[in-house]
Image (tube, rainbow, N blue to C red):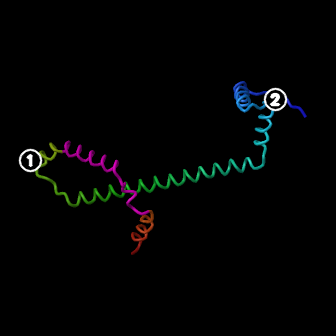
Amino acid sequence: MALSVYLDPDIMKSLSSFAARREQPMSLIAEAAIASFLSPDADERREAAIAKRLDQIDRKIARLERDIGISVESFAVFVRFWLTTTPPLPEPSAQAARAKAGARYDQFVAALGRRLNQGPKLRQEIPDDVESSGDHEHHQP
């Protein structure tokens, strides 16, 4: 049975060049493509590929959520510790501290850069199950 189909000129160029590279007639390539598209397992293959990709994305999001949680909690612990242990400076000392703040910040950024380049990262040092055991401890009376 014969069938005439209209193809967009760009698709026709792609089909023609693909057929030339494979040294196959365009009708054979088109027939194989249509058969693959109509195949009952084509939808299942697409669905499996999409499900696999969604699972990968889900795992990446879970890691990001964990890493952000670690960052927020680390910052909160640091701020609480700093506020608890750092008395206010008298004004002459506060002025001197402000004068050195830029250099101290630059040292901090350099140390952070070394830490990020050398590893291990803080998130790698913390076991994955800390969150669940930590939640359990906080909820006990």
Number of numbered tags placed on the structure image: 2
How packed is label 2: few (under 14 Cα within 10 Å), some, or many (20 or more)? few
Residue type at numbered disc 1: Pro
Q: Height in image: 100 above or below 28?
A: below
**Where residue 62 sits in the image (x, y, percent)?**
49, 55
Q: Residue at x 72, y 24 (%)?
A: 9
Of badges 2 and 1, the one in the foreground is: 2
Q: Is residue 115 above or below residue 18?
A: below
**Magenta segment, which residues?**
101-127
- Whichever of callouts 2 and 1 sits on the residue coming sooner in the sequence is 2
Outermost residue toward the bottom?
Answer: 141
Magenta residue check for 116: yes
Check if mark 2's residue and mark 1's residue have beta carbons within 8 Å. no
Q: Is residue 36 above or below residue 56?
A: above
Q: Residue at 59% of width from left, 49% of height from top?
A: 53
Q: Position of residue 6 (x, y in %)?
A: 79, 27
Q: Which residue is mark 2?
A: 5
Q: In the image, 51: left or right of 8?
A: left
Image quadrant in which you'd find residue 20: top right
- At which x and y percent is residue 92? 9, 47
Amino acid on which the number 2 mark rests in the picture = Val
Question: In the rendered image of this protein, does residue 54 appear above or below residue 102?
Answer: below
Q: Is disc 1 placed on a helix, strand or loop?
A: helix
At which x and y percent is residue 101?
A: 19, 45
Find residue 73 and name its label: none
**Residue 100 in magenta?**
no
Which of the 4 image quarters holds residue 85? bottom left
Residue tagged 1 = 92
Q: Image check: 125 left or right of 88?
A: right
